[in-house]
Amino acid sequence: MITTHATLPVLALVLLVAVPASAAPLTITGADLLTAAEASFPSTQPKLDGTSLIFEWGTSHGPPDLNLVRYQVNPSATLPPSGDIAISAVWNVTRLPCNGFCAGGVTDWDPYFALSDGTNVVGFVLGDDNGGQVVAESAVDGGSYSDGRAIFLWEKGTGFPEIGDSLAVRLDFTLHDTGATARVRYLGVDEFWTFANTLTRSSGLALLLAQDNDSGERYQVNSIQFPAAAAIPEPTTLALVGAALAGVAATRRRRPALAT
């Protein structure tokens, strides 16, 4: 969900589509990601398992943060050039056992949920160390991987899902004219961090799921959900809503069905 706060009342958008507050959340399954024009898999092609995607990379020591999923939230580069812009999403993932290079054994699991503008990456790493932990982290986007990690907030004892359990991770990013604020919520955890990194509001703006350099880590992505808008748009925006929804409907009609 993308929400601009440059003026009041708030103009609320979901994937650049303004919708009433009563609209249902938009859920994109793992299977949907395979045919979504906004989705790409920079480092490894996932395997389809029902409506979920399984990511398995390899057995050697890999790059610092291997980028698994990139989902563009601004493919048309039409965001306002200034003012706060909020981007929200809920990742639903299942923790799988590590199989290959795993420093922490079969239990190793360290997903990185982030936002990238193609150069700067900001977000949170979740982990199973220290009784569960969340780390606010920035990095440099190298395409198939992210490097130059800088660690900030480090909260321990947060808990983590058992192997085979699913986890809903809510991410809220706010782009400021200077810097960006991020918030993560899961299992009762609710953490904020404000990054000095200023993200460019370009067509490269994308939600990112990455893993660390233990390449044996395996990830199951069940869905990405974009929450319903938090405010009703002004009447002057309703024409934009209709045009956007018509475009979405046309795109869905053109999209080929998955092979069975």
Image: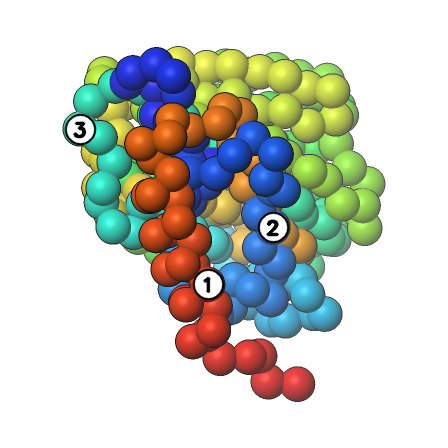
Q: Position of residue 217 (x, y in %)?
A: 62, 52
**Quarter occupied by the C terminus:** bottom right
- Identify the amino acid type marked 3: Pro
Residue corresponding to mark 3: 81
Q: Pick whichever, 19 or 99, lies toward us.
A: 19
Residue at mark 3 to residue at mark 2: CA–CA distance: 28 Å
CA neighbours of label 2 inside 10 A, class few (<14), some (14 to 19), many (20+): some
Residue 249 circle label:
1
Which residue is drawn at the image coordinates 55% and 79% (left, top)?
257
Residue corresponding to mark 2: 27
Do we see residue 188 in this rendering?
yes
Horizontal placement of 244 versus 47: left or right?
left
Mark 3 vs 1, N-terminal side: 3
Residue 254 occupies quadrant: bottom left
CA neighbours of label 1 inside 10 A, class few (<14), some (14 to 19), many (20+): few
Residue at mark 1 to residue at mark 2: CA–CA distance: 15 Å
What kind of element bears circle 3?
A: loop
Mark 3 vs 2, N-terminal side: 2
Kindly check if marks 3 and 1 are in contact, taking CB atoms under 8 A apart as contact.
no
Do we see residue 206 in this rendering?
no
Q: Nearer the viewer, mark 1 or mark 2?
A: 1
Horizontal placement of 217 versus 40: left or right?
right
CA neighbours of label 3 inside 10 A, class few (<14), some (14 to 19), many (20+): few
What kind of element bears circle 2?
A: strand
What kind of element bears circle 1?
A: helix
